Each structure stands twice: as C-alpha cells, then as structure tokens.
Amino acid sequence: INAYLKDTVTVTPRARDTYGDITDGEAYTVKGRFLHERKKVETPGGQDSFSNATLMIPLNDDTRAINLETKVTFERVDYGVVAINRRYDFSARFVEVLLR
C-alpha cells in the first residue's frame, strides 16, 4: 500500500479545554492517499452523514492520535473528521479517515 501514498497532508490534532473551547495542537505532515469521493457513512453516534473525501494513512503512533476533533489540510483546504476506520491488508495496517 505504501506505493499509493503519494499525497502530503497536514494533520492538526485538536482537543477541547476545560471550558469547551477547541485548541490546536502541533501540526505535522504525513504521506497518505487523498481521494475526493462522496460516501454515506454512519458516525460514531449512530447518525447518517456524508463524507466528501477519504484519507488513507499508515497506522503508527502519530495517526493513532487522530480523533473526531482533528483537522486535516490538503491543498490548502481544511477538512473535519466524520469517522475513522482501521483497515488491514495482509501485513499493512492503515487508517481510513472519512472527511467532510
């Protein structure tokens, strides 16, 4: 799968502070596969939603920290995370991040 990871994306971890405000963490770049495709997905809360893009990135310590608050930037466009799926393909492990 590493042969398909040609796109460079910026991932900005985000979290809520004690007052409920979102604070940005330190951004980092990662190689992945960015696909512009519209999908109907089920959110972790059980609601139906639409995803406008899919990001496939390798599973490692940095990508384990991706959550629903994370901001993903590709080609100067910011995306929010709708859902996160872990995928396995033989020995390769990667994360499918569905974006809006």
Image (spheres, grey):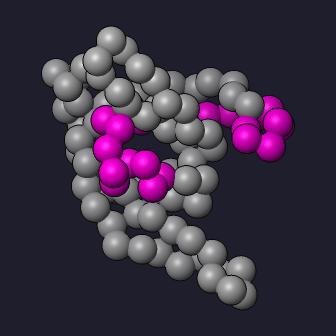
Estimate the x, y position of residue 67 in percent, counting from the top left.
Answer: 55, 53
Report whether residue 65 is seen: yes
The residue at 46%/24% (across/down) is 87
Question: In which quadrant will I find the C terminus?
Answer: top right
The residue at 45%/64% (across/down) is 13
The residue at 35%/38% (across/down) is 59
State yes or no: residue 93 in magenta. no
Residue 61 drawn above or below residue 24: above
The residue at 60%/53% (across/down) is 68
Residue 26 quadrant: bottom left
Q: How many marks?
A: 0
Report whether residue 34 is seen: no
Estimate the x, y position of residue 33 in percent, counting from the top left.
Answer: 31, 31
Tell whether 48 sits left or right of 37.
right
Magenta residues, as a range?
A: 43-66
Estimate the x, y position of residue 9 in percent, counting from the top left.
Answer: 30, 48
Residue 62 drawn above or below residue 44: below
